[in-house]
Amino acid sequence: MDPFRPLQRRLAPLWSHPQWPRLRLLLLLLHISAIVVVACPAPVRSPSKKQWEKPSVKAEIRGWQQRLNSVGVRIDERELTDFAFETGRRWSVARNSIVMPFSAYLRAIGAPQGWYMFTAPDRFPQRFQLELVHDDGVTEPVFTLGQSHERPDLVDPAFLDEHRVRRALFQTSWSERATLFQDVCSWFERRLEQQVPTLKEVHCSQIQFQVEHPWKIEKKAPDKNTRTVRVVRGQQARPSTETRP
Amino acid sequence: MIPRLRQAFERLAALTSRTESPVPLALFRIGVGCSLLWLIVPLLLTRVGRDVVGFAFVERSSGGYRNLAGSWGADLFGGAIPEVIFPLLWISALCGLLMVVGLFGRLPVLVAAVATRIALSQNMDVSGAGDALLGNALLLLLLGDITATLSLDCRWRTRHHQPSWIDPSPIAAWPRQLAAAQLCIVYTSTGVQKLVSMAWTPFDGFSALYQILQSPHWARFPHLIGDAGGWLAIPFSLLTALTITWEVSFVVVLFKRSLRPAFAVVGIGVHLGILIFMEVGIFSVISLAFYPTLFSQQTLAAARRQVGRFRSDPAGRTHRPT
């Protein structure tokens, strides 16, 4: 029942060749080298310094700076940021030149090796919030990710629990592509348009908050509305200039 | 120097020429098939799953949330539209089922690798480590005789003399060894990367998991920490310490086979924890599918010897003959 068996039988003389174990080992060593090299960490994934201005990254740098100061290394936050960015950038340039042929090979065979999993906690995550505005101007909340589902009939909580959807919403808060947030908001507008006849506008917001630390008793930063997108029914999404508390 | 290198090369060549029981690789095949079904079936059979496909994997003009980069695979069939993506997912699910029952050898693996990759790589923004590990697992399965035992193929092959689901005839060991090496690289690489963050170190009190589990994007119960009123700080700090130590040192199992059962037990606990507390797709399930590849009969025998030695002398003293 295995269609590969006839092929295997035809290739049997190759497998029994005395040099085959050595050739196979060479191929295996090449493959393992490729996965080791490509799995090697890339400290700076984006050439832009914008990501380093995010409060989560700044909090991380501040933590290391305080730790270094406590052991007698005098360095301020800005210097440490510049040092870390520059070292990371150089490392990435060197790494990319080595990795390029290997990653092309791994991409071709469908074996990607980027194992970036929770490298650091997001100390200032952003909750995606969706609101709709009716014809009469009344604003109604639909959901706030990870917090409330005011209209489960419009957006199923199970849909928001799906990791692909969460990943997309995470990207809207973390990615450098500003249009991503507008794209997601437009998608919700198109969806709500079919369900709410009185829909006039859709508002999507990113509400940034600070997570609790298990050991530090610190004054938490207040929740902050970092971005809002307004989508007027049937129109293109556009960033809103209004700021709400 | 060169003669020693040559010797090492010959030793390695002999090591990769070994044969062994086909059971671990068959279990790996069954695990990967189950992971594939775990991933695809909800996308096909539930309303929410179909909504997710429509949201994430199809072009904006067909109902998706963004314009996709496109790929030659999908373009070949007409682009990232529901009429292309859903049939590809059905094919993947069917292949997953064939892998579980062990029918048609490596053919369903090859088809699943191509169909799943085309369907789920349309939007890399929503793709994670689980998808990457699945791609690797399917590639590794293509290298070995995966339906030699515990399969319908085996039953069919042995139908003339004594029909059986089990055939103990040995198969090449290197595909299993390569899969075990891949798992070590995944864990060690992710562990080493975590060391850039203070939260994974004692400098910040191993606070990582406590903070990550408040994320609205990844935590299954984002209110859990806040509602618990602080008493989870110690348990989650201990779990953070355990996780990072286990990940960074996982590479040890490549050289010290007798430690594999202990590392596997911790790994099962870590992945069950991820499954319960986090929403990260199939990463845990597909990782666990790799675990049978850590064990050959030799490894289990070494572990049994270690346990026996520990039982006879719990202090771990070695008795040298005088």
Image: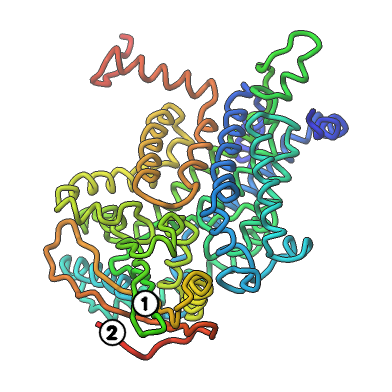
Dot 1 and dot 2 residues touching (CB under 8 Å): yes
Q: Give the Cα separation between the discs numbered 1 and 2.
A: 10 Å
Residue B223 percent location from the top left of the image = 25, 56
Residue flagged by tag 2: what amino acid is it?
Answer: Arg
Up-down relation of residue B311 to residue B256 (above or below): above
- The lab-note entry on whether marks 1 and 2 share a chain reads yes
Identified at 82% across, 34% down, the residue is A3
From the top left corner, tell me how far across and down residue B278 is, in percent.
Answer: 37, 50
In the rendered image, the vertical position of residue A166 relative to residue B250, given as above or below: below
Q: Position of residue A111 (x, y in %)?
A: 62, 52
Instruction: Give the percent coordinates (x, y) of residue B174.
Output: 64, 33
Residue B319 image label: none
Per the rendering, the mark at residue A205 is: 1
What is the quadrant of residue A10 in the picture?
top right
Identified by mark 1, the residue type is: Ser
In what quadrant of the picture does the C terminus of chain A appear? Answer: bottom left
Q: Dot 2 corresponds to which residue?
A: A244
SS type, badge 1: strand
Residue appearing at x 44%, y 82% in the figure:
A201
Classify B79 as above or below A24: below
Q: Residue furthest right?
A: A10
User: In terms of image quadrants, where is residue B258?
Assistant: top left
Q: Nearer the viewer, residue B319 or A180?
A: A180
